[in-house]
Amino acid sequence: MKHIGDVIDVGLIKEIKAEKPAASVNYLSSNLVDWIFVVQAMACKGFDEYYADREKLAAVKAYWYSEFTREGIVQKKQVQLGVNKFAWYKYPKPPQLGEFLEWCKPAAEDAGLLSPDKAYTRSLEILRGITPSDLSAIQIDLIKHAIQESDSYFLKTNSRDKTEPLFKRNYVITIRNHIEGDLKPIPKAIEAPVGQRYQEQDSGQRISPERLKQYQQENKDNLDRAHNR
């Protein structure tokens, strides 16, 4: 088994840690960025080559310092999901800031919920009046919420190329709102003319506040497990 010093450039790691952030940067944010870059150097085989120009490395880190400070990112738990993804990272080029921050956003799977692709497939069953017996109550309720916000009549009467993007958009928003503990009506992407709006013909109800509270602890536990993986 190789020693870590034989695998990565230890000198570069020391250089990463030695960079001093600007005075306007939050110290906690800069420490967090330093830690992330050390993880990147260990996980990305092309890190040394990509950052061979130390001025480029310093400039990129300065940008990350600034954005982390602006966004109030100061704790490991805020970026742990993104850092965890380095364990499965298959590309040599380090991720850009925007890409990494997307990794840090809780996905449906992180909360023990269905992915948008799977949710759309199961929504077709629900639209046919079938209640999937292998899904949990919250999984079903969130799919139903996305169906209602997408207009069940529209989903039933239009082709997949029209209904799938709409459902997935609203499902992703539904999951985000659920994780934040604030499930609510979803603004329409494009408001149709009054005469062309479809009437809601689904008898399902939005998730009640009382029922939502029952899921909060379960959801919190799932996210805690995802953070600690």
Image: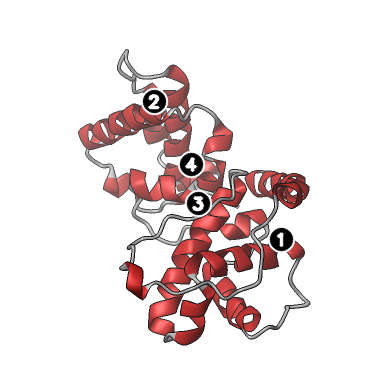
- Of callouts 4 and 3, which one flags the residue occurring earlier in the amino acid sequence? 4
In the image, 207 versus 4, the foreground residue is 207
- x, y percent for residue 6: 48, 45
- Of callouts 2 and 3, which one flags the residue occurring earlier in the amino acid sequence? 2
Q: Real-space Cα distance between discs 4 and 1?
A: 35 Å
User: Which residue is tagged 1?
Assistant: 138
Tell me the quarter of the picture where residue 205 sits.
bottom right
- Of callouts 4 and 1, which one flags the residue occurring earlier in the amino acid sequence? 4
- x, y percent for residue 24: 32, 15
- Of callouts 2 and 1, which one flags the residue occurring earlier in the amino acid sequence? 2
Marks 1,3: beta carbons within 8 A: no
* Pair 2/3: label in front: 2
Please rate how many residues cluster around mark 4, counting C-alpha atoms within 10 Å: few if below 14, some from 14 to 19, many from 20: some
* Pair 2/1: label in front: 1
- x, y percent for residue 177: 55, 49
In the image, 134 versus 30, the foreground residue is 134
Marks 2,1: beta carbons within 8 A: no
Please rate how many residues cluster around mark 1, counting C-alpha atoms within 10 Å: few if below 14, some from 14 to 19, many from 20: some
- x, y percent for residue 138: 71, 61
User: Which residue is tagged 2?
Assistant: 69
Marks 4,3: beta carbons within 8 A: yes
User: Which residue is tagged 4?
Assistant: 39
Q: Real-space Cα distance between discs 2 and 3?
A: 23 Å
